[in-house]
Image (cartoon, grey):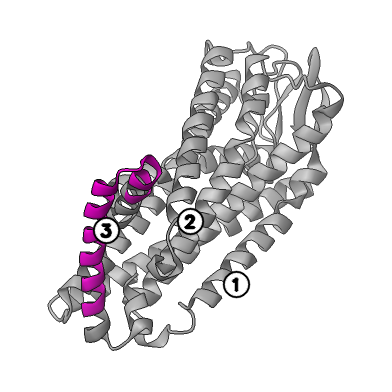
């Protein structure tokens, strides 16, 4: 998570005078009992390790399948898919650290390298959070250009422009995540050391709410606007489709991208809601009851696990919803296992697809026009 989503729930387990949440340290009265979820130091590490293994295998699989295609067989949307998978892969590599911390009641016991690992892992999580929402927004805009603005998007949907867009997303994510390096560090908490953020500054809390608006609410509004316009356009022009095969491919790609976006929003929305409530209560200096603090703490804990699950959802979406991806995965499998007969069958399938591609090329008037459906 980043400078605003980084409520290190892993730190929510320290029940001393305060417990850290990665962004905000919520002061708890000593009269409040530590009413946390029972067994969190057992179930959380298990959950984090499961997400780590499935996310690692799944995203490596996605990168391998898409990377195995030759340039002529790649779709424009594949560039975004690879970058999303790379961001999730880098993120899940940090989960073993947090799993170990959770198993030790949120304490950060990594010796002399503890502070470096704390800052670096928090920074990686922040970069992942920013890059994911930015890539999904770019994919939505790309679908809008492909469906609604076909004739005017030749340059914007070129391979060169999309690669430049991906580079800009990575650069902006790396820069915006810098506060995670500045405000995060290992500090004493209770009877040990914890990976906490210095959130005593009201300026930093205000910045956190601003970042929530810019990096979650704003992009989601853009995504909704893009897909609302796409649905309206398809409703008006569904009868006027002159190329059924190309239209089917376009709708299929649209469905896949929409599924990825819905999975992301469902995964991260609860976490952002709890985060906003907690920061708001800190800024307003509201005195909260023990029950309310417990509700916030446990709600954030559960919503964080849900958010982390998003890192291993996309490979499943690609495999079950993207016929093109599944076909390429089967070809890669048969190639690696050395089954020429099966590979020949798939090559025939690929040849059939190329026939359909040729038809689309002929009826659409060229390669640049065909790319709008990919």
Residue 285, compared with residue 298, is above or below; it is below
Circle 2 SS class:
helix
Q: Which residue is mark 1?
A: 164
Q: CA distance from mark 3 to mark 2?
A: 18 Å
Mark 1 or 2, closer to the camera: 2
Name the residue nearer the viewer: 199 or 245.
245
Circle 1 SS class:
helix
Quadrant of the rendered image containing residue 187:
top right
* Mark nearer the N terminus (1 vs 2): 2
Residue 237 is inside the magenta segment? no
Name the residue located 37 percent from the left edge and 40 percent from the top edge.
337
Q: Which residue is mark 3?
A: 347
Name the residue located 63 percent from the left edge and 66 percent from the top edge.
167
Name the residue located 52 percent from the left edge and 19 percent from the top edge.
46
| Left or right for 36, reference 254 | right
Residue 333 is inside the magenta segment? yes
Mark 3 or 1, closer to the camera: 3
Name the residue located 54 percent from the left edge and 76 percent from the top edge.
161
Residue 301 in the image, given as x and y percentages of width and height: 55, 27
The residue segment tinted magenta is: 331-359
Q: Give the main secondary structure, helix, strand or loop, of the magenta stretch.
A: helix
| Left or right for 235, reference 369 | left
| Left or right for 267, reference 346 | right
Residue neighbourhood size for the residue with mark 1, other residues' Cα within 10 Å, grouped as few (<14), some (14–19), many (≥20): few
Q: Which residue is mark 2?
A: 67
Mark 3 or 2, closer to the camera: 3
């Amino acid at each position: 998570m980043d400078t605003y989503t980084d409520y290190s729930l892993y730190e929510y387990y320290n029940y001393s005078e305060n417990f850290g949440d990665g962004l905000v340290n919520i002061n708890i009265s000593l009269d409040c009992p530590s009413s946390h979820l029972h067994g969190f130091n057992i179930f959380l590490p298990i959950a984090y390790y499961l997400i780590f293994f499935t996310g690692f295998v799944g995203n490596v699989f996605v990168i391998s399948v898409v990377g195995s295609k030759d340039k002529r067989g790649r779709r424009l949307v594949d560039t975004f898919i690879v970058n999303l998978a790379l961001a999730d892969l880098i993120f899940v590599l940090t989960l073993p650290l947090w799993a170990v911390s959770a198993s030790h009641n949120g304490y950060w016991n990594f010796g002399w390298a503890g502070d470096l690992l704390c800052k670096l892992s928090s920074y990686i999580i922040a970069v992942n959070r920013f890059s994911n929402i930015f890539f999904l927004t770019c994919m939505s805009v790309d679908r809008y250009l492909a469906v609604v603005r076909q004739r005017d998007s030749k340059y914007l949907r070129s391979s060169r422009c999309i690669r430049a867009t991906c580079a800009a997303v990575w650069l902006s994510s790396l820069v915006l995540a810098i506060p995670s390096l500045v405000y995060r560090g290992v500090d004493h908490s209770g009877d040990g050391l914890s990976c906490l953020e210095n959130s005593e500054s009201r300026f930093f809390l205000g910045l956190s709410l601003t970042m929530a608006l810019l990096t979650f609410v704003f992009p989601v509004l853009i995504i909704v606007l893009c897909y609302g316009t796409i649905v309206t356009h398809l409703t008006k022009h569904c009868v006027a489709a002159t190329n059924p095969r190309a239209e089917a491919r376009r709708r299929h790609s649209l469905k896949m991208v929409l599924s990825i976006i819905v999975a992301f929003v469902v995964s991260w929305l609860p976490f952002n809601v709890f985060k906003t409530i907690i920061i708001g209560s800190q800024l307003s200096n509201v005195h909260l009851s023990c029950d309310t603090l417990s509700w916030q703490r446990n709600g954030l804990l559960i919503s964080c696990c849900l958010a982390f699950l998003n890192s291993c959802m996309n490979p499943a979406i690609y495999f079950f919803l993207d016929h093109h991806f599944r076909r390429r995965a089967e070809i890669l499998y048969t190639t690696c296992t050395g089954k020429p007969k099966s590979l020949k069958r798939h090559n025939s399938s690929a040849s059939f697809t190329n026939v359909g591609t040729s038809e689309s090329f002929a009826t659409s008037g060229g390669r640049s026009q065909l790319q709008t459906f990919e």
